[in-house]
Amino acid sequence: MSTSKADRAYEILKQRIMDGTFGPGHRLVIDQLAREFDISSVPWRESLRRLEAEGWVTITRNVGALVTTFDTDAWQRTIRLLAALEGLATSLSAPHLTPDDIAQAREFNARARQALADFDMQSFGQANRQFHQLVCSRCGDDRLIDLVRTEWTRLDLIRRSAFYYAPGRALASVTEHDHILDLIEQRADPEEIDAAARRHELNTLAAVVEHDRQQAASLPGGRPASGVRVK
């Protein structure tokens, strides 16, 4: 099936936003895009409206279309949504995860733990993502997986525009991964697995909010602090 020009324009913009070419606050100028990609203005307008509806772009009168700048509130909303989505995806996947799958997930978690010991946050992030992808991958619902991936991408974008740090949270997160795998291996009730996966995400939210509150209280004027956020 052929791809429409509006779909092509959408994919170009979404990919450039996701890979950081168009960062938060970047102004998307239709005339420039039309010249660069040889696609007329109408498909670009359609794609921008679609991206605005999905939250990737903000369109303001007399300003135009800007790549959305995510703030602390956006991060909190994304974490809450991801907690619900990942909880459901993990609980649906659990009965279908094989012993080999669980062994692979434990290996990803071991890599994450070692990366923390080596102060290698890039490797930690990669292993952490691989763990989450695997435990959600057998849910049997492509639409749910797409929603989870969209929110993972949104978190990546937020990480580029606003950073948070909660001391000790990364190590606690790895321990929680072990608990989730234990529940899956024991064939625990799906509701218990769902609750554990949700709690895992929400614990990050609680840790970051509390750390930010403490930092704000210690600064003149109560300004929030910034650092490096880990999930």
Image: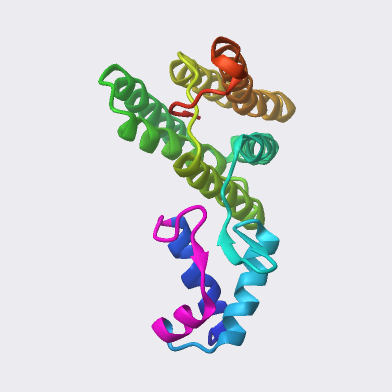
Q: In this view of the protein, which residue sits in the foreground, 4 or 143?
A: 4
Left or right: residue 11 versus residue 130 is right
Q: In this view of the protein, which residue sits in the foreground, 200 or 28?
A: 28
Q: Is residue 226 magenta?
A: no
Left or right: residue 166 versus residue 121 is right
Residue for point 50% across, 52% down: 24
On the image, the x and y values in percent for residue 35 come to: 42, 86
Q: In this view of the protein, which residue sits in the foreground, 136 or 101?
A: 136
In which image quadrant can residue 90 be found?
top right
In which image quadrant can residue 10 be found?
bottom right
Residue for point 60% across, 12% down: 217
Left or right: residue 58 versus residue 17 is right
Vertical relation: 145 (above or below) 101: below
On the image, the x and y values in percent for residue 172 come to: 49, 15
Vertical relation: 231 (above or below) 206: below
Q: Is residue 20 magenta?
A: yes
On the image, the x and y values in percent for residue 167 come to: 46, 14
Residue for point 28% across, 22% down: 119
Q: In the image, which residues are magenta?
A: 19-36
Vertical relation: 60 (above or below) 165: below
In which image quadrant can residue 43 be found?
bottom right
Residue for point 68% across, 64% down: 60
On the image, the x and y values in percent for residue 131 come to: 45, 35
Is residue 4 shown to the viewer in this render?
A: no
Q: In this view of the protein, which residue sits in the foreground, 195 or 226?
A: 226
Is residue 66 shown to the viewer in this render?
A: yes
Vertical relation: 140 (above or below) 184: below
Which quadrant of the rendered structure holds the N terminus? bottom right
* Farthest-out residue, left: 118
